[in-house]
C-alpha cells in the first residue's frame, strides 16, 4: 500500500509522459542503446517526460537522452536478488519491492508506450498493454515497437498462428501497435497520436450518459455487468404438500 501511495503522490503531477522498456543488458555504444538515447532526447524536446525501470541498458539510454536534453527523466527502480543499480540520469526516482505496484505506475501515468528489444520483462509489459487496450480496460494509447529486425518474427508468429491458424485474436488487434526504426518519426507519431486521442476523449466525455460508471481502472466508462437473473426462492418452498389435504407438511432442512 505504501508503494502505491508514494507512487501516486510523486507521479500525479508528472504531465505528459512515455513509458519505455527494453533490455538491461544493452551496452553503451550498441545500436539500440544509441537509438534509445536519441528517442529520450526527441521526447524531451516535445515536452514528454520519460519513464523507465531506472536501471542500465535501454533504461539508462532513454533516461540519459531525456536528462541531457533538459527533460523530465523518471526511474522506477526494483529490488532484485541481484541488486539492480539505478542509473544516474534521473530527475525523479522511486524504488519498488513489488513488480505489480511498479507496473501500475508505468501504465497509469503514461500517454504512450515504447518497447525496445528486450527479454521476458519487456515482453510482459508489451503484452499487458495489448491486453488492457484490447479489452478496453484503459483508453487506447500509442504503442511503439523499436527494432524491426527484432520484432518482425514475433509479429509473423502472431499473424500466422494466433490470428490465421487458431483465431485467438482479431485482425484489428494487430493494429494496436506500430513498428519503426526512425526515432524522429516515432516521437512525432507519439505526439500526434496523444493529441488526437486527447481531443477524442474530451469529445466523448462531453457526451457521457448519467448511467455510465467508471470501470475497474477508472480510466474507461461503461455499463456495469448485470448478473443473470435467478428465480427467487419463496419461503417454505421446501415444504411438501399433502396429496390428501393440500396442506403443508414436512420440515425445512
Image (tube, grey):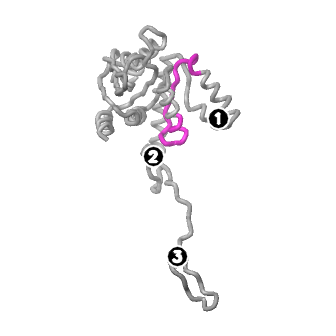
Q: Is residue 139 magenta?
A: yes
Mark 3 and mark 1 residues within 8 Å of each other at the beta carbon: no
Name the residue beneath numbered marker 2.
205
Residue 127 appears at what percent x and percent y? 52, 32
Q: Secondary structure at mark 3?
A: loop
The magenta segment: 130-151
Foreground pick, 173 / 196: 173
Q: Is residue 187 above or below residue 228?
A: above
SS at mark 2 in the image: helix
Q: Residue at x 31, y 36 (%)?
A: 3
Task: Name the residue located 40 percent from the left edge and 19 percent from the top edge.
Answer: 62
**Mark closest to the chain's N terminus, 2 or 1:** 1
Residue at (56, 64) in percent of width and height: 229
At 46% from the left and 30% from the top, the residue drawn is 112
Quarter of the figure that contains the N terminus: top left
Residue 172 is situated, as x and y percent measured from the top left of the image, at 62, 35
Residue 244 relative to residue 54: left or right: right
In the rendered image, residue 194 lying in the magenta stretch gets the answer no
Disc 3 and disc 1: Cα gap in Å? 49 Å
Residue 234 image label:
3
Q: Residues within 10 Å of mark 2 (few under 14, many from 20)?
A: few
* Front: mark 2 or 3: 3
Amino acid at each position: 500500500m505504501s508503494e502505491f501511495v508514494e507512487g501516486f503522490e510523486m507521479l500525479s503531477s508528472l504531465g505528459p509522459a512515455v513509458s519505455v522498456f527494453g533490455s538491461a543488458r544493452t551496452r553503451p555504444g550498441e545500436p539500440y542503446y544509441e537509438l534509445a538515447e536519441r528517442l529520450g532526447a526527441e521526447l524531451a524536446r516535445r515536452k514528454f517526460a520519460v519513464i523507465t525501470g531506472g536501471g542500465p541498458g535501454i533504461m539508462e539510454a532513454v533516461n540519459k537522452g531525456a536528462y541531457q536534453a533538459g527533460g523530465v527523466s523518471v526511474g522506477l527502480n526494483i529490488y532484485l536478488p541481484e541488486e539492480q543499480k539505478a542509473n544516474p540520469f534521473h530527475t525523479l526516482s522511486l524504488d519498488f519491492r513489488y513488480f505489480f505496484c511498479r507496473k501500475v505506475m508505468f501504465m497509469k501515468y503514461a500517454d504512450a508506450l515504447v518497447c525496445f528489444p528486450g527479454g521476458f520483462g519487456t515482453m510482459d509489459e508489451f503484452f499487458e498493454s495489448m491486453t488492457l487496450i484490447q479489452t478496453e480496460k484503459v483508453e487506447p494509447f500509442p504503442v511503439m515497437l523499436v527494432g524491426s529486425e527484432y520484432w518482425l518474427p514475433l509479429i509473423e508468429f502472431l499473424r500466422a498462428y494466433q490470428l490465421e491458424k487458431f483465431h485467438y485474436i482479431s485482425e484489428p488487434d494487430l493494429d494496436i501497435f506500430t513498428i519503426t526504426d526512425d526515432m524522429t518519426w516515432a516521437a512525432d507519431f507519439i505526439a500526434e497520436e496523444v493529441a488526437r486521442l486527447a481531443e477524442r476523449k474530451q469529445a466523448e466525455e462531453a457526451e457521457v450518459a448519467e448511467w455510465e460508471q467508471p470501470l475497474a481502472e477508472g480510466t474507461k466508462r461503461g455499463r456495469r455487468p448485470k448478473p443473470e437473473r435467478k428465480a427467487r426462492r419463496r419461503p417454505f418452498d421446501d415444504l411438501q404438500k399433502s396429496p390428501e389435504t393440500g396442506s403443508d407438511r414436512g420440515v425445512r432442512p
